[in-house]
Image (cartoon, grey):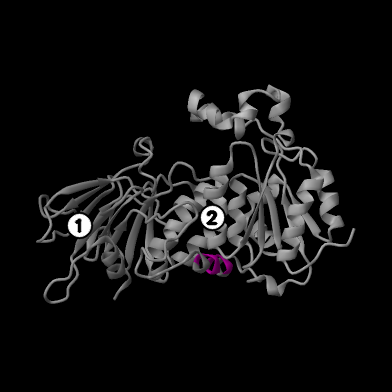
Amino acid sequence: MSPIDQLHAYVGGNETDEGEATRFACHSDLHTDVCVSNRPVRIDTLTMRIYAPFSQDMPQTNRIIHPYPKKEERWINRSVSSVQILQGSILPPPHCRYTHNVTAVVFSSGLFSGNVFHDFSELIIPLFLTSRHFQSRLHFIVTDFKPVFFNKYKKIFSHLSSYEVINPAANVGVHCFPGVVVGLHYHDHLAINTTAIPSGYSMLDFKQFLRESYNLKVRDMSQMEKPVLVLVSRHNSRMFLNEDQMVTMMRALGFTVVVTKPDMTANIDKFSKIINSCSVLVAAHRAGLTNIVFLPQGAVMVQVVGLSLEWPSTNYYGNPATEMGLNYLEYKIEPEESSLISLYGRDNPIITDPPSISALRGMLVGRAIYLGEQNFDINVTRFRNTLVKALELTGHSAPSG
């Protein structure tokens, strides 16, 4: 079965009596719409109209797709450029100006590119899911093109496609392809459902793909002799107020400690190698935890969970970490470790009843408080117990006393 026919099976394409796959099929779920044609199409990059073949067993209708995951967020459709699929022969298709011999994958680089969590969760992992089995024989056509995004992840794109990315605004004309995929498959936050696609990819396969893309040397913990701990430092919200004390305690446990500053994370080529060389990653709940995708198998992620951040901590990073073959530990702070006490007082509902804040004042207010105003003064003695567990998971033991 060809790569595009595999996707056809995924989106529900039917087989004829002669075994020929249906020419055009679409899949819709809560998060995304994906349409596939395994017959020639013409794409006008000026209007982003796609002229697709007509299938006898499907109604001859036009479709408008916003080719970015998370369509359940209604406002996305107002901000992501649409693609119109004209199926059938209602209008004669325009003449080809450019002819390509590989399949096109059309998607939007979206709203959130620049935030590493959204980059990976809503674009890079869906791109891997949708296009990896083409074995680099495909053209990306990207609406809402953002040069910074593609420059940052150029190693990933070069390993997914052997061809230059097509920016419609810079490549105006009618492009003809032997097939097309419009939209990207999305499963969940930093997640791949191994049973949902014919190729059966998993997050372990995705991590192997990243190791190949960035030439990362360490595959699993057995390749590491000494325990190296990376502490992700922040200079704004959710920062560690007593970071120096934390580092002193970590070194006393026997860790080689690397403190990464925000400017270090900007260069993903270098930062991926730093993360790949560590056995324990410690960070407060934040987008930067997405870099766990570069950790070796069996490494430990320690997430510091602030007040009212239990659900996003578990669902955005905790559960995905285990699917990536990592050990996951949480350190849930006590109210006294939150800077919110000094701002609002120990008896304020913000401290004593965090769920009531979002319920009564709205989710945006809750996010502004717990994500935007909260810093941490970590109880080093209590936190030490968590790091002792992390050390043991790396195959080492804490010094006596």
Q: Is residue 360 left or right of residue 226?
A: left
Q: Position of residue 353 (x, y in %)?
A: 59, 29
Please tell me whether mark 2 or mark 1 is closer to you in this view.
2
Question: Which residue is at the front of the view, 373 or 171?
Answer: 373
Amino acid under disc 1: Ala
Q: Quadrant of the C terminus?
A: bottom right
Q: Residues within 10 Å of mark 1 (few under 14, many from 20)?
A: many
Q: Residues within 10 Å of mark 2 (few under 14, many from 20)?
A: some
96 w.r.t. 18: above or below:
above
Give the camera-side residue of 38 and 249.
Answer: 249
For residue 294, the mark is none
Marks 2/1: CA distance?
40 Å
Read off the magenta span. Answer: 206-211
Q: Quadrant of residue 254?
A: bottom right
Going from N to C along the chain, the mark reached first, 2 or 1, is: 1
List the residue tagged with mark 2: 319
Rendered view: 20 above or below 171: below
Q: Amino acid at mark 2?
A: Asn
287 is higher (above) or lower (below) than 78: below
Residue 313 position (above or below residue 51): above
